[in-house]
Image: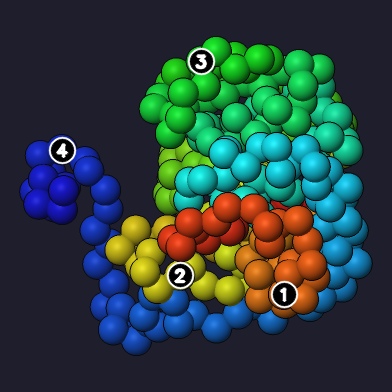
C-alpha cells in the first residue's frame, strides 16, 4: 500500500515525513491526558448510573448473548448502547460505520424508531433488520442532508475510519456534522480509549481520531455519559458485579465506546 502512495500512482494511505518522529513515544506509550482524566473522574457517578441502567436490562441482554460473540462491538459496548437506547428512546439513529452494532441498536429500538446505517461494507448482515435503512456508501458519497433529521434526543453513532485527515470521514463528522447537531443529541464514538493511548497492538493502524475528540471534551460542549475504556481501568469492581461480566467476550475484544451528550 505504501509504495503506490509514495510514488503518486494511487492514494492508499498517508506517509507523513516528520524530522522529529524518533522523539515521539512508541504506540501505546502516550501518557494519559490529565484534563480528560479529571473530567472522567468527575463523571464517575454518571458512568456508574449507566451501568445501573445496563443491569436493569440484564435479562434482555442475556437473551442477546449470541450477538456478543464477536470482537468488533464487545459486550460492554453493546450493553451500554442497548441500555441507553432503551432508556432514551431516540426516534432517529444515524450510524456511520455499521454491522454488529446495528444488530444491537435494532434490538434496542424494537421497531419504534429508524436507524440509518451508512457503510459501503458492513461487518454483519443488516439489510433485513427491523427499522434499519442502509445507505451502502462512504460518508463522503452519502446524501448531504442525511443529518438534518437529528433532533434533541436522537443519536449519532460514529464508527469511522478513525483517521483524522482533511476530507476524511472523521474530519467531516467531528468538524462539520457535530458542530451543526442540535443540543441534546446523543453522540457515540467507537474505538476511543481516552484518556489513554490507543493500544500498542494497534500501532500499525495509525489511528488518530481520538486526538480530535480531546477538544470536544475539554471545551465543555459535550457532557460525558460513559467511557468503556475508563470503566475497564477505573471501575473494575463495579464491572465485575454487572451483568456484563456474565456475557460472552472474545479474548481479543477491546471495549472502547465513548458516549456524550451535546450541551
Identity of the residue drawn at 70% across and 28% down:
107
Q: CA distance from mark 1 to mark 4?
A: 46 Å
- Residue 123's place in the image compared with 41, above or below, is above
Please state if 24 lies on the left or on the right of 223 as rendered. left
Q: CA distance from mark 1 to mark 3?
A: 37 Å
Which badge, 2 or 4, is on the more N-terminal residue? 4
In front here: 238 or 208? 238
Q: Which circle marks residue 74 in the picture? A: none
| Tag 2 residue | 199
Which badge, 3 or 4, is on the more N-terminal residue? 4
- Residue 143's place in the image compared with 197, above or below, is above
| Tag 1 residue | 236
Determine whether the residue tagged by mark 3 lies in a helix, strand or loop. loop
| Tag 3 residue | 127
In front here: 123 or 11? 123
Q: CA distance from mark 1 to mark 2?
A: 18 Å
2 or 4: mark nearer the eye? 2
| Tag 4 residue | 10
Whole-percent x and y of residue 114?
Answer: 72, 17
Q: Quarter of the image holding residue 138? A: top left
Please state if 217 lies on the left or on the right of 202 as rendered. right
Mark 3 crowd level (few <14, some 14–19, many ≥20, 10 Å Cα): some
Amino acid at each position: 500500500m505504501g509504495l503506490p502512495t509514495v510514488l503518486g500512482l494511487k492514494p492508499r494511505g498517508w506517509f507523513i515525513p516528520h524530522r522529529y518522529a524518533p522523539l515521539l513515544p512508541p504506540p501505546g506509550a502516550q501518557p494519559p491526558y490529565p484534563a480528560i482524566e479529571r473530567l472522567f473522574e468527575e463523571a464517575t457517578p454518571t458512568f456508574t448510573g449507566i451501568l445501573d441502567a445496563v443491569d436493569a436490562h440484564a435479562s434482555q441482554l442475556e437473551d442477546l448473548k449470541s450477538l456478543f460473540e464477536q470482537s468488533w462491538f464487545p459486550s460492554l459496548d453493546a450493553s451500554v448502547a442497548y441500555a441507553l437506547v432503551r432508556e432514551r428512546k431516540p426516534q432517529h439513529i444515524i450510524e456511520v460505520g455499521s454491522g454488529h452494532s446495528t444488530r444491537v441498536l435494532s434490538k434496542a429500538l424494537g421497531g419504534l424508531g429508524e436507524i440509518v446505517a451508512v457503510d459501503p461494507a458492513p461487518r454483519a448482515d443488516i439489510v433485513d433488520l427491523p427499522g434499519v435503512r442502509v445507505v451502502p456508501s462512504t460518508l463522503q458519497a452519502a446524501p448531504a442532508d442525511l443529518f438534518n433529521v437529528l433532533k434533541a434526543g436522537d443519536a449519532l453513532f460514529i464508527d469511522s475510519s478513525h483517521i483524522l485527515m482533511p476530507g476524511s470521514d472523521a474530519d467531516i463528522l467531528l468538524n462539520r456534522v457535530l458542530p451543526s447537531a442540535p443540543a441534546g443529541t446523543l453522540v457515540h464514538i467507537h474505538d476511543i480509549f481516552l484518556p489513554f493511548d490507543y493500544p500498542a497492538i494497534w500501532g500499525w493502524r495509525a489511528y488518530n481520531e481520538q486526538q480530535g475528540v480531546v477538544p470536544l471534551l475539554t471545551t465543555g460542549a459535550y457532557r460525558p455519559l460513559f467511557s468503556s475504556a475508563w470503566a475497564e481501568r477505573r471501575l473494575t469492581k463495579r464491572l465485575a458485579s454487572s451483568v456484563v461480566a456474565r456475557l460472552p467476550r472474545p479474548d481479543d475484544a477491546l471495549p472502547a465506546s465513548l458516549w456524550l451528550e451535546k450541551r
